[in-house]
Amino acid sequence: MATPESDLGKASTILQNSELIRVLIVAFLVLVLQIPILLIHKQILARQATRDEAVHEITSRWGGEQRIFGPVVRVPWRERRVEMGAGGRIRETWVQHQATFLPETLHIAADAQAETRYRGIFEVPVYHAEARVSGAFRPMDFADWDVPPDQILWERAEVLLAVSDTRSLRDHPVLVWDGASIPFEPGGQGLPDCGDVLTAPIPDLRAGEPGTFEIDLRLGGATRLSFAPVGDTTAVELSSNWPDPSFQGRWLPSERSVGPQGFEASWQISHLGRGYPSRWQDGAIDALPLRQAEFGAGFLAPVDPYRMAERSVKYELLFLALPFLAIWLFEVLGGLRVHPIQYLFLGAALCLFYLLQLSLAEHLGFALAYTLAGGSVAVMATLYSKVMLGAGSRAAIIGGLLVSLYVYLFVLLQEQDYALLLGSVGLFIALGVSMWVTRRIDWYALEGRSARS
């Protein structure tokens, strides 16, 4: 009569000798290891959120993304309306409108000196920008709108300039209009979603007269500095000591020079492609085309360790499956038996790589952190494989496989534009090598041998 002990012994024998069951167990262990991978991914997101809080804390005091829109001229005018009131009496009312005119030429020469601020262990690049904004307006023309000249309020004309965050202005900007200096004042309206609007009155403006302007701005900011192409022809020259700019927006620079000491970039833009006209009335233009036409440069860290860590976790199945497959092949070809707990220990070391990489990158930078984390895990896995597989040559193969995978992943992370291509080629090569190594195995013979055992 069979005893429970004998049944357990038979089950253990089947577990040890059935290759199919062992494959299923290894696959199950890979699924189990998704739990620590998920926890590590959550930790990456949590640290990224903490970094973002530090960035927000610094930029809220220093200045965040800065967008410069303008200057534009706004001229109010009154429309006379006659309505029939109660009792047949005629009632006359006046409705005020706003006409907005954009400059004919706009030239901006800006220099943004960047520096790094710290909040704990987190680095935040910020900049101090000085910009000279100059250009000219053509005569303000109301003829196409059929506005009577006596209803135009030229004495209430004003220049509007929008800056994303006026709290970061380092001095009081002054408008120089046809040689006359006029200080800007806060609280203007009429530029939708363009930031804080400054206004400067130009009471001497007259019909048929052009105007030239010049404005000096000194402001702090972070992350990005962008401009709007409000001129019929817009020319922008931007220089900085930041060595890793990210040129953003609808237009890329027509000329640029980037080096270790910083960058210089210039844009030449026509109004034909910006998506809004050179003049409009009231709220005829909404915020969307104004925002879509912006361009400029981003001041970001060249390598974001959190983004890199999050991208590397996406390849964790490859890093678990290939070493496990290699060990399983050693079992099949060499007659070895590796316990599932040993697979778990090795898998735990491979999972720890991602957490180790992230924690080191916060202090040492991504490249050095990746090298130390990958090297440490590869050495640990190689030494453990020597005990697990019983031979130094087999352990060296496991170590070489891990080193190759870490080098491959590093290249993959650096070449973001070619990530899909490199990933597909890598998987194809891994599958091809696995098929070549196992090409002479008689799987039916293995199962038959397991059944006889």
Image (spheres, rainbow, N blue to C red):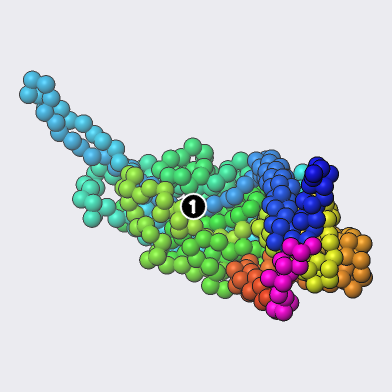
Q: Nearer the viewer, residue 384 or 280?
A: 384
Which amino acid type is marked by label 1? Phe
Q: Nearer the viewer, residue 33 or 446?
A: 446
Q: Report the quarter where the C terminus lies.
A: bottom right
The residue at the point 63 percent across, 74 percent down is: 428
Q: Position of residue 280 (x, y in %)?
A: 32, 51
Asked whether residue 189 is in view, the answer is yes
Residue closest to the far top:
87
Q: Give the range drawn in magenta.
A: 437-453
Residue closest to the far left:
88
Tag 1 residue: 69
Quick check: 432 left or right of 137?
right
**Residue 50 falls in which quadrant of the image?**
top right
Magenta region includes residue 184: no
Q: Position of residue 419 (x, y in %)?
A: 62, 68
Magenta region includes residue 443: yes
Q: Considering only vertical position in the picture, is 403 above or below 226? A: below
Q: Nearer the viewer, residue 333 or 222?
A: 333
Q: Position of residue 25 (x, y in %)?
A: 72, 55
The residue at the point 9 percent across, 24 percent down is: 89
Q: Which of 281 and 158 is in front in this view?
A: 281
Quick check: 352 left or right of 264?
right
Considering the whole magenta stretch, tell me its main secondary structure.
helix
Q: Position of residue 117 (x, y in %)?
A: 76, 49
Residue closest to the far front:
1
Q: Considering only vertical position in the picture, is 403 above or below 205? A: below
**Residue 377 falls in which quadrant of the image?**
bottom right
The residue at the point 76 percent across, 56 percent down is: 14
Q: Report the quarter where the N terminus lies.
A: top right
